[in-house]
Image (spheres, rainbow, N blue to C red):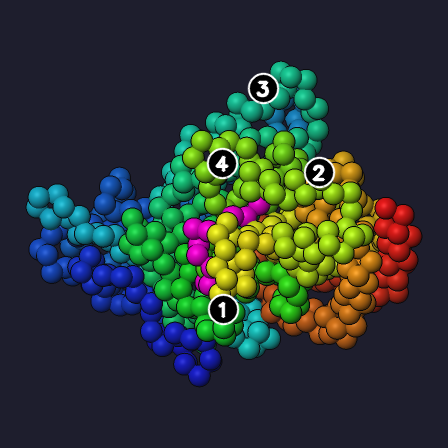
Amino acid sequence: MTGAIICAMGIAGLCGCAMSENEEEKNPIEFSVESGCYEEAFDLKLTTGDGGAIYYTLDGSDPADSATRIEYTESIHIEDRRGAANVVSAVEPNLFDTAFAYFDKNTDSVVSYATAPSDDAVDKCTVVRAVSIAADGGCSDTMGKTYFIGDMTEHIIGIEESCEAATAPLAVISISMDYDDLFDEENGIYVRGSRFENALTEYLAAGGERSDDCGRKLDANYSQRGREWEREAHIDFFESDGTSTQEVLSQNCGIRIQGNYSRSDLQKGFRLYARTEYGDKRFRYPIFPEKTDDNGKPVETYKSFILRNGGNCAFISKFNDTYWQSMLAEMDCDTQNSRPAVVYLNGEYWGLYILQEDYSDEYFEDTHGVISDDVVLYKGDAERYASGFKLDLGKLPEGETDERYYFAELNDFFVTHKDLSDESDYEKFCKLVDKDSCRDYFAVESWINNKWDWPGKNWAMWKTVNVDPDNPYADGRWRFNFYDIEFGGICGESEASANTIREDNYTKYGLLDKATSNPAVLCFAYLMTNAKFREEFYQTLNDLGEKQFSYENANAVLEQFEGVYGPLYEQFFARYPGTGSREEALSGGYGSVKCIRGFLQKRNLYIQNMIDYCKEHYGEM
């Protein structure tokens, strides 16, 4: 049996599972075998010290109230389930996908042309959830375990090669939850559901265009946000190098659908939340081993984390966003740590994901030492919101309804000042906005030519509403953070010459000029009217090309990502038939590894053209 991963791999906490607070007190059920990967089938025994009856499920549902629960008697036989019939993977894509879809004018419906995978294309493990119910009806906390039988290299194809390239184990996350919480027409978070059908009826009645992509723009169950659309789940988190596998976290938690446009995709992202009501208010494990706070102290607990499907590159190379972010640690902007993960849903292989940090208020507290309740963060989305953005973190004061409330001081400055050519005005503005953060943010976005979505969407600014003179990050100034930058270099060599600022990727929703209501763009446009800032911006563009994004460095990082993710592609694309292939992800067009490499080879040749344009354009403002 392979039940333990070697501690010498250098991942903090590998030698012990991070347990929820008071777990021994709350969870009297004992499993005779811990979660893990085992060579042979075995009989699992459950015991409880409270004398209650034990019930368990094998379909991911909560045995406390599941109609499929089984009363435990002697043992549960745990065997290799590879080749077993699909359940969650057998759900028809037409119920939840509008990305791989067309509009059928004969039936006035959006039809997915994706197909469910075969039983053999979906690897399986066994999830056991158990609860003890006393004679008076009182329940213990529900516990869960996950078991793989056989060699882990047979379950996750390419895991050894991937771990060797990463010099670290692969995260394997088993999620178990009620089927209806995912796929019920009214309340399921993963499906189009009744909301979509109602939205489609209204859309067509209003004369909406019957286009193949119209479904992606319509409301659906999977589009819903907030606590109302959070469901309870259980996760078993493993670190595995293919040779040895160790569970490092086992916890009940909340789960939501994550993302924006990608919510309509065939494979959807998840956001997971630790809450006291589920068992523990934190995930007590260093999910990202290299993550430290500003003082160099390791971050070992998390309030939430993301399982990202890759966004717009979900069925290309997947890692485009995290690839660019991985090279930006030295910039004066926040970035998200990430690593690859393989996810199982109710015992069935659900695919390759990006395990990524979440920009929660706790993120800023854990990273910068600010008070989490003081953090406000805006995210831009000019298509979804009338104001062009939403308040993503923080709350408006009681009685306040204006979404722009926290931008008031900044907007007042824009109204009362024409530009920043006067040094005193420049200094005043720099007390409102961290000019270094703005400089680095726009230099990176422009250098990588993050087209289409940005800057109308996918910009983020944060600050603290209270000032702490002892913490430079609690000074009340606006700062920028990177996210969803996968469109960088996505079209390869053909757009390496793009002048991102002149051509403006999102003219309709926010020019890189002062003629906009986009506060992020206005910050940059105003700062560019100051000669000193302009020189810093040009120098930063050049430095990026000589350092982080030099072909030698950026290609070396790309080769490592290729080595880590590449071996895992074949199984992923087999799970989602017709969506792509390993060859296309590595050597195809649009968004492939080859495409990014072509962009890197040529981009530096054209940065000076963008600088020359800025000198001409902003010199006249």
Whether residue 489 appears in magenta in the rendering, the answer is no
Q: Nearer the viewer, residue 112 or 271?
A: 271
- Relative height, residue 340 to residue 4 (above, below): above
Mark nearer the viewer, 3 or 2: 2
For mark 4, give the secondary structure: loop
Q: Position of residue 226 (x, y in %)?
A: 45, 39
> Which numbered disc flags the more N-terminal residue, 4 or 2?
4
Please name the amino acid that badge 2 sits on: Val
> Of the residues under marks 3 and 2, which one precedes in the sequence?
3
What residue is rendered at 39% in x and 67% in y? 285
Residue 505 lies, with reference to residue 11, above or below; the image says above
Residue 405 shows up from this direction: yes
From the image, state whether disc 3 or disc 4 is nearer to you. 4
Residue under pointer 3: 202
Q: Is residue 476 left or right of residue 13?
A: right
Give the mark nearest the N terminus, 3 or 4: 3
- Percent of width and height locating residue 195: 50, 28
Residue most toward the bottom?
Answer: 8
Q: Nearer the viewer, mark 2 or mark 1?
A: 2
Is the residue under label 2 in contact with that under label 4 (CB below 8 Å)?
no
Q: Which residue is mark 4?
A: 224
Labelled disc at residue 385: none
Q: CA distance from mark 3 to mark 4?
A: 18 Å
Q: Which residues are magenta?
A: 366-378
Task: Determine which of the numbered discs, if any, sits on residue 293 in the image.
Answer: 1
The mark found on residue 415 in the picture is 2
Q: What amino acid is found at the position of numbered circle 1 in the picture?
A: Asp
